[in-house]
Amino acid sequence: MTRAELVNQIVSKKSFLCVGLDPDLSKIPHHLLQSEDPIFEFNKAIIDATKDFAVAYKPNTAFYECYGAKGWESLAKTIAYIPSECFVIADAKRGDIGNTSNYYAKTFFETIICDAITVAPYMGEDSVMPFLGYENKWVVLLALTSNKGALDFQMISSKDGGKLYENVIQTSLKWGNPDNLMYVVGATRAEEIAHVRSLAPESFFLVPGVGAQGGSLKEVAKFGWGKDCALLVNSSRGIIYASNDADFSIKAREESQKIQQEMEQILVTKGMI
């Protein structure tokens, strides 16, 4: 998907919502467990309920890989079911030597057809470049995450005084461009998003942490707004587990619409729509 197509979806749906598809068999409604593929049936219902409000979906591959071949089958079926106009991010956090990354890229861009994949930058340029070699495909690079352990490395200062995450962004901007490279920036570090935006003024940010993790959508928009919005704000648990009863898809739709309506007001205020 091109940047123009993604921006068109944001304008058309009046939303920059990404729904995380993280199916946990211990949390999904019990009646689905009797089906042949509970994970896919759950995801299918969530997608049907939220597709009017979501411009992107982000299946976290760990929730599928743990079930072996059957899990991979559920993942492939889920991705194939997502509407073609939606942006699909494989949250796989890959990153290895170049030859291995080549095969990771083939997996998620040729076999299981996604628009983007999350990538860990720790091993440097040659581990990231294979993913950037595909036309109209995206790397979503881990930059400033919202987990507690982010402080262990991302905030370490280098000899020039810059933080490690700052060096990651500044260096990686030489590898890609705003049409194929996004950054993961956690919503729970909202005030620091402004600094990240100053480093990458045109790049899209994938922002997890809104909703169940306590991040504020208004704060994210205040500090992280960029050219053509340049934000994809992810909500997973707050939407897909809004209910664990038979009405789970209804509640998921209500929660996603609630977020979309707030996003619409932000887009109006920013002059996007």
Image (cartoon, rainbow, N blue to C red):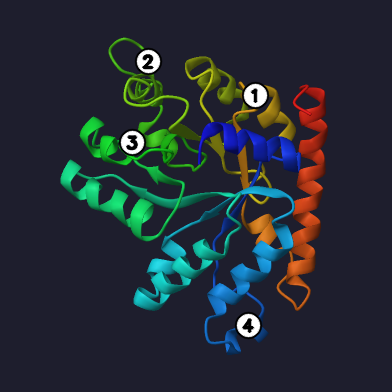
Numbered badge on residue 162: 2
Q: Which residue is mark 1?
A: 225
Check contact, mark 1 vs mark 2: CB within 8 A: no
Task: Describe residue 28's horizontal placement relative to residue 164 as left or right.
Answer: right
Instruction: Give the x, y percent position of residue 2.
Output: 51, 36
- Amino acid carrying label 3: it is Leu
Numbered badge on residue 32: 4
On-image quarter of the C terminus: top right
Marks 2 and 3 sit apart, C-alpha to C-alpha, by: 26 Å
- Amino acid carrying label 1: it is Trp
Numbered badge on residue 136: none
Q: Secondary structure at mark 3?
A: helix
Marks 2 and 4 sit apart, C-alpha to C-alpha, by: 50 Å
Q: At 54% from the left edge and 30% from the top edge, which residue is drawn?
A: 204
Q: Would you say residue 26 is visible in this rendering?
A: no
Check contact, mark 2 vs mark 3: CB within 8 A: no
> Is residue 64 placed above or below 177 in the rendered structure?
below
Q: Secondary structure at mark 4?
A: helix
Residue 143 lies in what quarter of the image?
Answer: top left
> Is residue 248 placed above or below 263 in the rendered structure?
below
- Amino acid carrying label 4: it is Leu
Check contact, mark 1 vs mark 4: CB within 8 A: no
Q: Secondary structure at mark 1?
A: loop
Q: Which residue is mark 3?
A: 132
